[in-house]
Amino acid sequence: GQPKYQPMARGQAGVNKSKAAIFGNRPWHYSAECSTNSKSAQGLVGLKNLGNTCFMNSILQCLSNTHSLRDYCLHNSHRRDLNNNSRTNTALMEEFAKLLQTMWTSSSSEAVSPSEFKTQIQRYAPRFVGYNQQDAQEFLRFLLDGLHNEVNRVTVRPRGSVEDFDHLPDEEKGKKMWSKYLEREDSKIVDVFVGQLKSSLTCSHCGFCSTVFDPFWDLSLPIAKKGYGEVSLMDCMRLFTKEDVLDGDEKPTCYRCKARRRCTKKFTIQKFPKILVLHLKRFSEARRTSKLSTFVNFPMKDLDLREFASENCLNAVYNLYAVSNHSGTTMGGHYTAYCRNPNSGEWYTFNDSRVTPMSSSQVRSSDAYVLFYELASSSRM
């Protein structure tokens, strides 16, 4: 395997001495906090490639470094939420938790094989059977959906009732729609990853505005095109939320006019999730025939999304902690992950079974595909 990485390389003697001074009279504290330099004590364990499974490994490492999800698994909190009515029983959540536990507690720093986990994700989503390269963002969607179903706190979903919230002010309506969602879908996975999107349709004829509120697990952002200058993540967010005109075949029926009318549609974010997953749409819709390798500049800290909030939102500032990268072409590509370790705050490259320290200045690249951001105030959820 790789030589063990000693995180105390900088000014080593000094660091060790001060550690000894701090912990000298409290050896038990020292052993609890930093018992070993083993990679697993810090989650720095690679995942074996089972044959084109780098897409899976990349996402698993990003999730392993998602603080609240990691702790949920490490503390076995998932066990009390296991939902025996789930259609796949609960083997996917159990294997996922087991894998994270191994990555954070095994005594060896050898790479771990995720084959048991793969068996379960295949049962849940048969499209992952076999060893073809797959799309990392689609894999993330299926995985979170599967985990959510197995730890959903709702064991019997209520029968769908049609309630009319249209008479309510938007903020109230958004809250009601969110509670209605939680009556059916309520899990630790939802607590961490799900936000709420508001789409407003305004009739160009009579000016009537109707609003729809939908939960989202991630946002798929179109990559802005620029004649000059670099493209920023904010450019992509603005493109995602900009007003669109619906005309021709797309014309919806206006509630007030009772006729199909030209209208404008706009997205805003009603509820910001604790973990915001942003997917850069590098691949053409026509199933990955071409790839955009545009460099998108994204902030590592203080991504301020308040301008995209529906209401006055105090809390919409995010810090980056993981990136799933795709290098190469659509046909022959490779996935890796860059993750910030939740314990040390240091960045590492996870390339299947290899884990190596990296500088935070290397994190931004034109390979960035799925970005994981944590809400600044919720870093200790």
Image: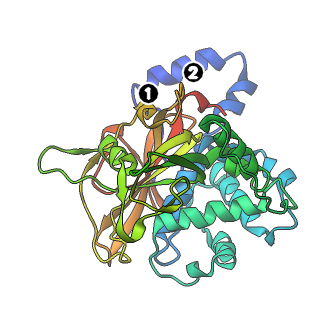
- Give 232 or 255, whichever is nearer the viewer: 255
Question: Compared to 324, does 138 lie above or below?
Answer: below
The residue at 33%/63% (across/down) is 282
Q: Secondary structure at mark 2?
A: helix
Q: Secondary structure at mark 1?
A: helix
Q: Which mark is residue 12?
A: 1
The residue at 52%/52% (across/down) is 62
The first of marks 1 and 2 along the sequence is: 1
x and y percentages locating residue 111 in the rendered image = 55, 62
Residue holding disc 2:
19
Residue 70 visible? The answer is no
The type of residue carrying mark 1 is Gln
Q: Based on the displayed image, in which of its 4 quarters is residue 176 positioned?
A: top right
Extreme residue toward the left, this view: 228
The type of residue carrying mark 2 is Lys
Q: Residues within 10 Å of mark 1 (few under 14, many from 20)?
A: few
- Give 20 or 342, whichever is nearer the viewer: 342
Q: Based on the displayed image, in which of its 4 quarters is residue 12 positioned?
A: top left
x and y percentages locating residue 48 in the rendered image = 53, 68
Number of dots carrying numbers: 2
Question: Compared to 111, does 266 lie above or below?
Answer: above
The residue at 59%/20% (across/down) is 20
x and y percentages locating residue 351 in the rendered image = 43, 60
- Give 60 or 359, whichever is nearer the viewer: 60
Q: Which mark is residue 318?
A: none
Residue 195 visible? The answer is yes
Label 1, label 2: how many angstroms apart (C-alpha)? Answer: 11 Å
The residue at 87%/60% (across/down) is 155
Question: Compared to 367, does 168 lie above or below?
Answer: above
1 on left or right of 363: right
Extreme residue toward the bottom, this view: 130
x and y percentages locating residue 169 in the rendered image = 63, 35
